[in-house]
Every structure is written in structure tokens, then in C-alpha cells.
Amino acid sequence: MTITKPSKVYIVSGVIVGLAASLVFSYVKPVTYDTSISFSINRINRQDTVEYQYDGYYAIQASDLFSQTVMSWFMTPSVLLEIYDQAKIDPQINSLTDLTSRFKTKKYSPQNIVVQFTERDQDTADKISQAIINTVEQKSSVANQTSDQQALFDVQGATPVTVEHKPVLWLNVVIGIFCGFFVGFSLAYALLFSRQNRADQK
């Protein structure tokens, strides 16, 4: 394709618009706070007898199953509402899908799971973090009791880690310029193709 003057105008205009859009997006997009909380799930009150010589293996398997239960709480709307209620924060629910998608859980081992979420400010992130730890530890102490009121697992939340997440200006600029160039080039090509078709029809 021969780059004519009109084509150059389209391409340059596209790049300028893309650059401007990326700058506006970078400055308008609010800063968010990403938080991660890890929970350790440990088997307690085990019996030390000859019959239980493989109890260490079964303890890990049992912890693995119980960790699945803990992870399922973050997909349960009623439990999530308990967390927000304890944090004294309005959950601002738009839909059940929106509510349950706010928290991501991942199991790194049978005895270690991590909960991650993003909030709009540090104070809100701190309140929800503490509410999550309190809720999980309280529900766990009740959910894993035996008939004689002895707990089988001890669930402990570690200190939450919160990181400020700012838009990456240089990356947004590169993406904006590339998209602008692509759109401008496409328009220039479409214009040239249209002119060639009209010329061929004459």
C-alpha cells in the first residue's frame, strides 16, 4: 500500500487519539488496593496409637477436604454478607455473581489456602481483611467439632498483605499508540481500497 498524504493524516490522527485516550484513562482510573490473606489448616487432637501409624497421611487428606469447605464459604453469599456485616461496610450488591466474584481463593497445599480481593481504599481493605479472618476462624471452630466438642482442625489467618495498585502509565501509552496506529492504518487502507474500486469502475 502506497502511503499517501490522506493516509498519513489518518495514521497520525489515530496515533494521537490513541495516545490521548491512554493518558486520560491512566489519570482517570482510580488507584485500587490488592489484598492477600493466607490461612493455615492444621490437624489437632489426633490419637497416638499403633492403629494410627499412618495418621500423618490421613491428617493431610483430612486437611485437604476441610480446606475445600473453607474455600466454598467464599462462594456462599450468606457467608460473604456476614463478612461485610462484621466489617460494618455496605456490600453494595448488584447481583449474586458480582458478590461471589469479588473474592478469589487458591489452594497452594492441603494445609494452605490464600484469599485475594481488591478494594477502593486502604481502610476498607483493612476492615474486610480482619472481618474475613474473624469469620473464617469462628466458622471453622464450629464446623470441625466432634461429638465431644473437640476441634479436629486449627485454622489460623496470617497477617494480611495489601499492595497499592496504580495504572502502569508507560504500558497504557504503548497500548494506546499501537491501537491508534492500527485503527488509523485500517481507515487509511479502507479509504485507499474504496478509491481503487471507484477508479476500476470508471
Image (tube, rainbow, N blue to C red):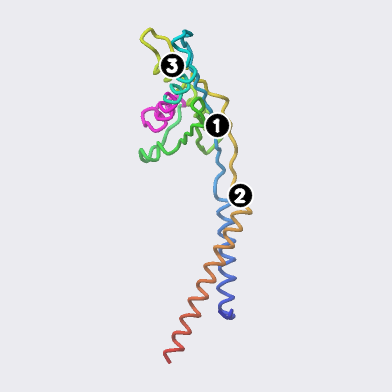
Is residue 71 rendered magenta in the image?
Answer: yes
Residue under the image location 40 percent in, 28 percent down: 73
Q: Amino acid at mark 3?
A: Ser
Q: Residue furthest right?
A: 170
Indicate which label's residue lies in the foreground, 3 or 2: 3
Q: Residues within 10 Å of mark 3 (few under 14, many from 20)?
A: some
Quarter of the image with the N terminus is bottom right
Q: Secondary structure at mark 3?
A: helix
- The residue range painted magenta reads 66-87
Q: CA distance from mark 2 to mark 1?
A: 23 Å
Residue type pointed to by label 1 = Asp
The amino acid marked with disc number 2 is Val
Q: Give how far across and how far down residue 99 sits, in percent.
A: 40, 37
The residue to which callout 2 is attached is 168
Residue 198 position (above or below residue 50): below
Closer mark to the observer between disc 1 and disc 3: 3
Magenta highlight on residue 72: yes
Up/down of 93 relative to 160, above or below: below
Please say if the residues under marks 1 and 3 sit with CB atoms less than 8 Å apart.
no
